Amino acid sequence: MYSLLATNQQARDKQNSPCLLSAYWLLAVLLIPASGYADLGDLKVYSPIVEKGELAFEVLGDTTFDNDKSRDGFQYHEFEFEYSINDRWATSLTNSIVKLPGEDLKYNVLGWENTIQFTEEGKYWLDTGVHIELELDDEKDVADQVEVRFLFRHNSGKFEHIANINFEQQFGSAAEESLELEYIWRSKYRLSDTSGIGLEAYGELGEIKKFESLPEQEHILGPAVYHDLVIFGIGLETQMTWLFGLTQGSVANTFRWQLEFDF
């Protein structure tokens, strides 16, 4: 996470001067519909780093494009309020709405998330942590679920690499699937203090007791652009990613976006 509140006047000038660029980023993200690929869940990279006292509001989503109508147009929107209790623990509440192809938007899931940072940032070769998420579905006939993500981060010069290993388990009377395994990867290169480019990958292997065959697994990969702004004293982190399906079981194209307001 880049520092958004610069400590010297030169950095402030660089961040506040490009007003037109700031407006472009906001419009480009907000005018594109949000959605989520149902099986992979919300497409988001989780960092193990916690910043004490940080209060943030986050909006994210992704939209899919596919010739198969059953995969095209599934919309997903998520809203998150997060607060870092101390330098090791951040907690947040999330709400999401979805739109199935041919249907209207509807409320979906209430979530409670917690990130726990294990190691001091930069002290070891890997920064590590865990992210635990409880999701309660609005539909009684849809299973609730808990997700545990093990978080890994490594910085090398201008490069930052983050990996998430996700374990997902349904519970409740509607539970049908056993423990599932997913992964997330991001490699990001800093172009400046406020911008960067990268590569992101998301994959779902299926239930651990019996993985899907490779063609049926979901694996998506693509380039990403990151830019940070300061607007009226509020830090704004923006992310935009285009992901391509790598297997028959993957959606053909996915556009992912994310806005985070840091107060």
Image (tube, rainbow, N blue to C red):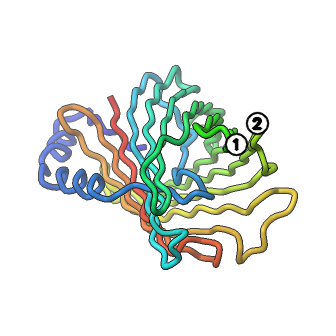
Of 224 and 208, which appears nearest the observer?
208
Name the element at disc 1.
Answer: loop
Residue furthest to the right: 209
The numbered disc on residue 129 is: none
In the shown orientation, is residue 135 left or right of residue 187?
Answer: right
Q: Is residue 148 above or below residue 209?
A: above
Question: Which amino acid lies under the numbered mark 2 shown in the image of this protein?
Answer: Gly
Q: How many marks?
A: 2
Q: Residues within 10 Å of mark 1 (few under 14, many from 20)?
A: some
Where is the C terminus found, in terms of image quarters? top left
Q: Is residue 100 above or below residue 95?
A: below
The residue to which callout 1 is attached is: 143
- What residue do we see at 17% from left, 51% from top? 23
Q: Earlier in the sequence, mark 2 or mark 1?
A: 1
Name the element at disc 2.
Answer: loop
**Residue 212 visible in the snapshot:** yes
Q: Position of residue 44 (x, y in %)?
A: 51, 50
Q: Position of residue 157 (x, y in %)?
A: 47, 55
Question: Which amino acid lies under the numbered mark 1 shown in the image of this protein?
Answer: Ala
In the shown orientation, is residue 112 left or right of residue 107?
Answer: right
Q: Position of residue 179 (x, y in %)?
A: 79, 49
In the shown orientation, is residue 141 left or right of residue 26?
Answer: right
Of 144 and 169, which appears nearest the observer?
144
The numbered disc on residue 172 is: 2
- What residue do we see at 63% from left, 47% from top? 152
Q: Residues within 10 Å of mark 2 (few under 14, many from 20)?
A: few
- What residue do we see at 64% from left, 41% from top? 128
Asked if the residue under mark 1 is in contact with the one under mark 2, i.e. CB atoms within 8 Å, the reply is yes
Of 136 and 257, which appears nearest the observer?
136
CA distance for labels 2 and 1: 6 Å
